Amino acid sequence: DAKTTQPNSMESNEEEPVHLPCNHSTISGTDYIHWYRQLPSQGPEYVIHGLTSNVNNRMASLAIAEDRKSSTLILHRATLRDAAVYYCILRDADRGSTLGRLYFGRGTQLTVWP
Amino acid sequence: NAGVTQTPKFRILKIGQSMTLQCTQDMNHNYMYWYRQDPGMGLKLIYYSVGAGITDKGEVPNGYNVSRSTTEDFPLRLELAAPSQTSVYFCASSSGRSNEKLFFGSGTQLSVL
């Protein structure tokens, strides 16, 4: 199964943009790239996902490299409420029953300073 | 919508006791998952299910059992609790399509003393 690599931690100041990187060099052509975040003492929540093209929603933007071996989650203006652990995972549409095996790594701990 | 509901929220067990963590979802999702999260660590997949009657092991299945008799429910059973099972347990569900998101419950904090 394709795995992802993320930095353990990153820091940002409030109202500055944040770029959270994720490497997935063994990604297959049918893998979707998903991002989730986990606020303190809560379960993870969905942020954004994409396949090939860059994606935007009200929470964030996802920039996907042309070769799809890396992606970047972009928070345009970090707030204190964005302090969380951010997970990048791959979901494969074409692996039958192994589609169920969704692995989360340790993610990136984002600290936002006021 | 309630989404994914986990009970109980907190539980303390003695070594050797058994218990069942409950998880139910009201979104008619086929795929359900159990993860554990140790302090300062990421999520580890324990078991997952792709539909009623179908379950499979994840990364850390030892010491746990699951069943999936209905689409809505996916209970996790600890038969002989051990201190190593002290963790926060999260249940999640999804439609199973790779472009659909996962929904997580709020977690169960379990301590085994």
Image (cartoon, coloured by chain):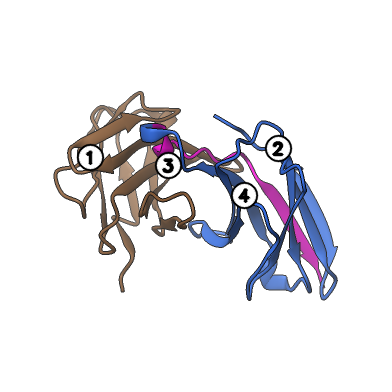
Say which of marks 3 and 4 sits in front.
4
In the rendered image, residue A103, in percent from the top left (x then y), is placed at 52, 38
Looking at the picture, do discs 3 and 1 lie on one chain?
A: yes
> Which is nearer the eye, A91 or A9?
A91
Chain A rendered in what hue? Answer: blue
Q: Earlier in the sequence, mark 3 or mark 1?
A: 1
Looking at the picture, do discs 3 and 4 lie on one chain?
A: no
In the rendered image, residue B9, in percent from the top left (x then y), is placed at 34, 57
Say which of marks 2 and 1 sits in front.
2
Disc 2: which residue: A5
Range of magenta residues: A98-114
Q: Secondary structure at mark 2?
A: loop
As drawn, the label of residue B35 is 3
As drawn, the label of residue B19 is 1
Q: Secondary structure at mark 3?
A: strand
Disc 3/disc 2 C-alpha distance (Å): 19 Å
Q: Earlier in the sequence, mark 4 or mark 2?
A: 2
Disc 2/disc 1 C-alpha distance (Å): 35 Å
Q: Look at the numbered discs 2 and 1 and tell me whether their residues touch, using CB distance below 8 Å.
A: no
Looking at the picture, do discs 3 and 2 lie on one chain?
A: no
As drawn, the label of residue A87 is 4
